[in-house]
Amino acid sequence: MPKPKKLLDQVRDRIRTKQYSYKTEQAYINWIRRYILFQNEQHPEELTAKDLEKYLTYLAVEKNVAASTQNQALSAILFLYNEVLDIPLGTDFQFIGAKRPKRLPVVLSKEEVQQVLARMTGTTKIIAQLLYGSGLRISETIRLRVQNIDFAQSQILVRDGKGALNRITMLPEIVVPSLKEHLVQVQYLHQQDLENGFGYTYLPNALSREYPNAEREWIWQYIFPSKIITENRLDGVLRRHHISPSTVQSAIHTAARSAKISKHVTPHTFRHSFATHLLEAGYDIRTVQELLGHKNVQTTMIYTHVLSSGPKAVLSPLDSME
């Protein structure tokens, strides 16, 4: 008889069955391992909700982690109990919550956006233009596939965004010529891959089993593919994945430094700027919420605090003097 799988291997199997991202898999495995070590390597089946509360309080008080970090640890451990061990712990926990810092998003002015983009070229510039011009997250942008772009309607379909939500956002006209030229090059690369016996891409939600040939079709290819073909960690198939987010982050950081922007500029800064500039232009906050894909309008409201017209859009009395 085969030996029963180790607990963390069972967790990995369950995560992959539910089609969670590799990043989530790594984070969950890491937190579950930490939790077990904290409990002196006791098997989680022997622990209770009280033990979980003790660990979460330890993270907040002793480790001083951020609220988002504490929430991720909780999600990982609840996944272990609910999805792997089938031992529901409930949801009513009593623990000291980590402090939630009130951080305002970093926003660039329109002139600063122009300065950064002017110092970028090639693929990373197109990506940065979509981050700012469409309000996309970096993860959403690099995962775009050919069929997600609708040139006729000037729109982008974002599939499986944060929270597994789908939404539609605008495709800026200014990026269309360079994006079309880029796709010609990508299609040529894909044709070469096919001729060399490759041309496979990763399909989400087990679509490769439902549509066996789809993973080599043009419409399913990533718009921003990696320069190399790598072996897939799940099935060993050689595939061309999408560009790494670190490549984009590095290009944006270099451009911002070259432009002498005295702000911490990241890919997400462009998304923050997209939202803020739309609100400054007078667009309804519900419209901006929909374009950003926020579940709650309160998340979108934070951008009202960084409008260029001053705190809460109030005119300073000094500026009103004649």
Image (tube, rainbow, N blue to C red):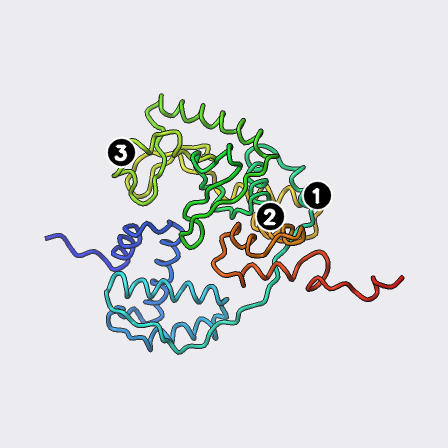
Looking at numbered disc 3 in the image, what kind of residue is underneath it? Pro
Q: Which is more toward the observer, 280 or 144?
A: 280
Q: How far apart are the alpha carbons under marks 2 and 3?
A: 38 Å
- Of marks 2 and 3, which one's residue comes earlier in the chain? 3
- Of the two numbered discs 2 and 1 on the same chain, state the one appearing first in sequence: 1
Residue 112 vs 38, above or below: the answer is above
Please give the residue where the numbered disc 1 appears in the rendered image: 259
Q: How many marks?
A: 3
Locate residue 30 relative to residue 278 in the image: left or right.
left
Look at mark 2 in the image and give the residue it sits on.
270
The residues bearing labels 2 and 1 have C-alpha atoms spaced at a distance of 15 Å
- Of callouts 3 and 1, the N-terminal one: 3
Q: Nearer the viewer, mark 3 or mark 1?
A: 3
Residue drawn 15% across and 55% down?
A: 3
Secondary structure beneath dot 2 equals helix
Q: Quadrant of residue 50?
A: bottom left
Work out whether residue 243 or residue 132 is closer to the camera in this orientation and state it: 132
Q: Which residue is mark 3?
A: 212
Tag of residue 159: none
Is residue 11 shown left or right of residue 125?
Answer: left
* In this view, 74 is above or below 136: below
Whether label 3 touches label 1, CB < 8 Å = no
Please state which of residues 301 and 114 is positioned toward the viewer in this rendering: 301
Q: Residue at x 49, y 42 (%)?
A: 141
Answer left or right for 77 relative to 5: right
Outermost residue to the right = 322
Eyeballing the image, is 320 above or below 1? below
Q: Residue at x 65, y 62 (%)?
A: 305
Query: Which element carries disc 3, helix, strand or loop?
Result: loop
